[in-house]
Amino acid sequence: KGGGRMKHVTSIAFVLMLMAVHASAQTNCSFAWGWTMQTAQLKDNISLNYYDTGKGQPIVLLHGLGGHAAHWLQNIDGLVKAGHRVIAINLPGYGSSQPMLANDAAQQLHNYASVVQALVENLRLKKVILAGHSMGGQTAMLIALQQPKWLEKLVLAAPAGLETFTAQEAALLKQYATPAFFKQQDSATIARNVKTSFYNMPASAAALIQERNSMKSCAGFDDYCKTVSAGVAGMLGAPVADQLSQIRVPVLVLFGKQDASIPNKLLHPQLQHADVMNVALKNIPTVTAVWLEEAGHMLQWEKPADFNNALLHFIRQ
């Protein structure tokens, strides 16, 4: 019995490590991705940085838990060449964006949604294609539910929020998803978890491992760990599955067929990828589903050409 409990605890820990396999560099230890970020000063003195390039109909990109704008690095050039302005945001607490920790961590994603809306309004964007990966997908759904006038279409890449958790499961995840949990990961664990986000990790993704390891010696690392911990609570505290029928714009949902993070195989071993996709298909009024072959959770990085083709086809419909 004790051994079974220990196995269960170990499984929960592994789930949480998968939820935060990616890395972000703080202002004082930025990782060189070969681009220049811009900074916007928003309401409540929030400083948000983002990458803004290209011309045409804007596509706004939101990264996932533990991620940053460069998680779209493989996609941006192709989208720009197709005639779009692309804005990849570092959410608060990621990259050089100022941390924004809610007093109630369950409000974290709602705060992210407000900040993204503020940036879109600050940049005076119109007819926006909003795309979110994982946690960014759940944040994008929260924004869509507010029905902003500037939103034209929604793209959800392996989104969180379609899979739901019981109160007991949520409590268990939050119990282990502490800042200390993320801070104590060693190099071997980091490498293993990054690889697990891919079906067949491309050589370019090795930079994600290097970056995450480099962060451990950065002064901003504590804030980063707090931000990731708050993101877990924020996803659990902002359920959207029962509100999907209220989304009024066309939606594209993409999943990699070999996604090892969604659904959660340790808490929901019977749940299949199709079950999660069906939540969107059955509840979102106007929805298109796309499966990417030989792709894991980081599908936009692993299969950038297929991802971009699906996104651009959806935009032009």
Image: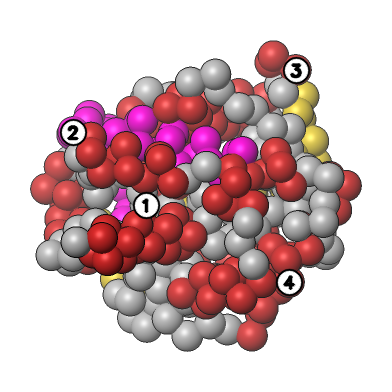
Tell me where the magenta segment starts and ends, as one range.
Answer: 226-253
Q: Secondary structure at mark 3?
A: helix
Q: Is residue 51 above or below residue 8?
A: above
Depth check: give the residue in front, 232 or 161: 232
Q: Residue at x 72, y 23 (%)?
A: 46
Vertical arrangement, residue 183 with respect to residue 263, above or below: above
Where is mark 1, residue-wise?
Answer: 159
Q: Nearer the viewer, mark 4 or mark 3?
A: 4
Question: Could you tell whether 4 is left or right of 41 in the image?
Answer: left
Q: Is residue 137 visible?
A: yes
Q: Give the labeled residue for mark 2.
A: 242
- Residue type marked 4: Gln
Q: Tell me the kind of residue under disc 1.
A: Pro
Is 242 colored magenta in this rendering?
yes
Say which residue label 4 marks: 210
The amino acid type, in three-letter code, at marker 2 is: Asp
Q: CA distance from mark 1 to mark 3?
A: 29 Å
- Whole-angstrom CA distance, mark 4 to mark 2, is 39 Å
In the rendered image, the vertical position of residue 271 relative to residue 133, given as above or below: below
Quadrant of the frame with the C terminus: bottom left
Q: Quadrant of residue 23?
A: bottom right
Residue 131 location in percent, x, y?
47, 49
For discs 4 and 1, the disc positioned in front in the rendered view: 4
The mark nearer the N terminus, 4 or 3, is 3
Specify the principal SS of the magenta part: helix
State the SS at label 1. Answer: loop
Residue under label 3, please give it.
45
Q: In the displayed orientation, state which residue is furthest to the top.
A: 44
Q: Are marks 3 and 2 in contact (CB under 8 Å)?
A: no
- The answer to whether residue 56 shows anywhere in this view is no
